[in-house]
Image: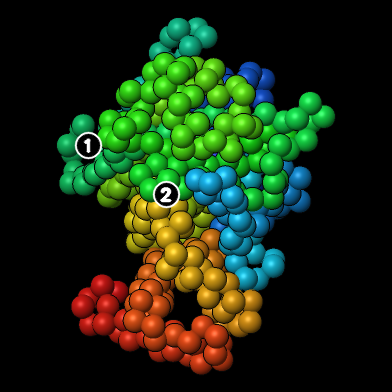
């Protein structure tokens, strides 16, 4: 393992950067973190991106690694399933798993980030600097130039290693492709849809206006609305909608009348809970959604990208933060195993990790279509019902794709994707061909699904997909 006396500079004190700082401090390194925004524990900077997030087993595993799972638990609201709201105003709960102990949580981004910063700052070998924006990184010299918003001056910091956890718009990543000093591959794919955050406020007594322990979804084919609960009794609501396609889109929803008309037509039951809709809608920003893939993530043993900076994904699997936390767990394991220098550590880490972050990026796109459309489709609902029964009756033998991705932190995203997709294909094909007797013996159904899944996986192996 590299020498512990070394100075590690982390750019970005978001979710990944603050967890990484904490873990590296626990390992004994000297850690300096530079964050462009003010300290979120002192200033309210919640306006921006996703106020709350779905937090699940891969993220929880990372909290266990740094020993703070008991402090994270009070920040969590369990969500046992998706509460689906149809156009008639009816709703029904579709559990995430047939195993009772498997659920996801709603957690406040600010609350979790503040906890991670507090925990990191408990270590003498960590310094966190706010209001300091990284302008550029010289990855040959391992130096970073910052602008201090308070003193309005620029300064340069030197380090043994620089790790960029500066999110989807990473300055380190930008320096890799702008400098053109090595073969750096990069792709950025935007969805035609963007998102806007809205809210359902608590009742006058501070209670939740609708069922608390679910992720609410109003799937409408080409667009959707979702809502996640907050500890104060409110829900953060997110509208995912095309920028310029369809009768209603972000570009044409510009007047209070049109916004109200759209919600009256498409989400009347949600509108009833949102008297503040028009104000939220016209005041809150509309933001794009994209996937970033790149490689290599590192330059020699000098610099490394981690979290969204290396692999930003669309939010539809609720895994971006969980994956960024899992990055820290995997990196930690590589540090345990590697006797060598930083270059070997970075290379080994990327080799192990990239296939999995590529997989969750693709799965997140799949889930975009599943959430806005397929969840309301009868054959999909039949499949969900069957999978729920299989998980309930054969908890050791069957896990749906969702469970493999979300609740099976001991396997990588790539393995979850390959097995999960094969299972989906097997079940949907057999349901469409009426080959599964859903009223018959469930064990026979399980065996058929397993056999067909193995056959598909074998075909994939032969085709070189695995
Ligand atoms: C709408 C939406 C919903 C989401 N929902 C979920 C969910 O339910 N579950 C889930 O797991 N994930 C979710 N995600 C993804 C999740 O937000 C990200 O994956 C996660 O925040 C990544 O953490 P990060 O630390 O890598 O990046 P970030 O959280 O973006 O943090 C980067 C930090 O770097 C700082 N920074 C940036 N540039 C500079 C600079 N030049 N100098 C210094 N500091 C800088 C930023 O201010 C920030 O603090 C969602 C994302 C969106 C957009």
Q: Position of residue 10 (x, y in %)?
A: 48, 36
Residue at the disc numbered 2: 372
Q: Is residue 253 left or right of residue 15?
A: left
* Badge 1 residue CB within 8 Å of ligand 1: no
Question: How many residues crowd around disc 2 within 10 Å: few (fewer than 14), some, or many (20 or more)?
Answer: many
**Location of residue 138 (image quadrant):** top left
Q: Position of residue 4 (x, y in %)?
A: 55, 48
Q: Is residue 104 left or right of residue 186?
A: right
Q: Position of residue 455 (x, y in %)?
A: 33, 86
Q: Residue at x 26, y 82 (%)?
A: 459
Q: Position of residue 244 (x, y in %)?
A: 28, 30
**Location of residue 199 (image quadrant):** top right
- Label 2 vs label 1, nearer the camera: 2
Q: Residue at x 24, y 44 (%)?
A: 187
Q: Residue at x 42, y 68 (%)?
A: 379
Mark 1 secondary-structure assignment: helix
Q: Nearer the viewer, residue 427 or 220?
A: 220
The disc placed on residue 177 is: 1
The disc placed on residue 32 is: none
Image quarter (top left, top right, bottom left or bottom right) of the C terminus = bottom left
Colour basis: rainbow
User: Relative to residue 107, is residue 344 depicted above or below?
Assistant: below
Q: Nearer the viewer, residue 64 or 388?
A: 388
Residue 203 visible at all: yes
Residue 307 visible at all: no
Q: Residue at x 53, y 42 (%)?
A: 226
**Disc with the residue nearer the chain's start (2 vs 1):** 1
């Amino acid at each position: 393992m590299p020498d512990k006396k070394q100075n590690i500079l982390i750019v970005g004190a978001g979710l990944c950067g603050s967890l990484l700082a904490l873990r590296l401090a626990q390992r004994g390194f000297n850690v300096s973190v530079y964050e462009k925004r003010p300290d979120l524990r002192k200033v309210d900077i919640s306006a921006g991106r996703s106020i709350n997030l779905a937090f699940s087993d891969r993220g929880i595993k990372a909290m266990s690694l740094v020993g703070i799972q008991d402090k994270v638990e009070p920040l969590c609201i369990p969500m046992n399933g998706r509460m689906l709201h149809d156009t008639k105003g009816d709703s029904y709960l579709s559990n995430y798993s047939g195993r009772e102990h498997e659920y996801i949580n709603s957690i406040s981004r600010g609350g979790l980030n503040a906890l991670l910063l507090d925990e990191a700052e408990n270590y003498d070998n960590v310094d966190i600097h706010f209001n300091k924006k990284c302008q550029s990184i010289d990855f040959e010299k391992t130096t970073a130039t910052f602008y201090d918003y308070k003193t309005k001056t620029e300064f340069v910091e030197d380090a043994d290693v620089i790790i960029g956890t500066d999110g989807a718009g990473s300055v380190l990543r930008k320096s890799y492709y702008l400098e053109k000093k090595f073969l750096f591959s990069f792709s950025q794919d935007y969805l035609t849809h963007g998102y806007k955050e809205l809210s359902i406020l608590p009742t006058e007594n501070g209670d939740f206006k609708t069922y608390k322990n679910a992720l609410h979804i109003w799937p409408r084919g080409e667009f959707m609305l979702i809502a996640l609960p907050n500890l104060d009794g409110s829900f953060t609501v997110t509208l995912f909608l095309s920028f310029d396609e369809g009768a209603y889109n972000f570009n044409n929803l510009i007047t209070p009348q049109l916004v109200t008309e759209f919600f009256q037509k498409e989400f009347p039951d949600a509108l009833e809970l949102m008297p503040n809709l028009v104000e939220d809608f016209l005041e809150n920003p509309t933001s794009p959604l994209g996937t970033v893939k790149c490689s290599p993530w590192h330059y020699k043993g000098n610099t490394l990208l981690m979290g969204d900076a290396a692999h930003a994904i669309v939010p539809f699997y609720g895994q971006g933060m969980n994956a960024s936390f899992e990055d820290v767990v995997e990196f930690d394991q590589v540090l345990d195993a590697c006797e060598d220098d930083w270059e070997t550590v970075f290379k080994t880490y990327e080799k192990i990790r990239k296939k999995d972050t590529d997989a969750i990026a693709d799965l997140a796109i799949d889930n975009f279509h599943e959430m806005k459309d397929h969840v309301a489709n009868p054959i999909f609902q039949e499949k969900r019902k069957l999978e729920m029964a299989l998980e309930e009756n054969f908890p050791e033998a069957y896990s749906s794709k969702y469970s493999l991705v979300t609740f099976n932190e001991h396997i990588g995203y790539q393995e979850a994707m390959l097995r999960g997709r094969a299972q989906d294909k097997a079940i949907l094909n057999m349901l469409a061909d009426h080959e599964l007797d859903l009223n018959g013996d469930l064990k026979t159904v399980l065996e058929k699904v397993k056999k067909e899944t193995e056959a598909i996986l074998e075909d994939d192996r032969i085709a070189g997909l695995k």
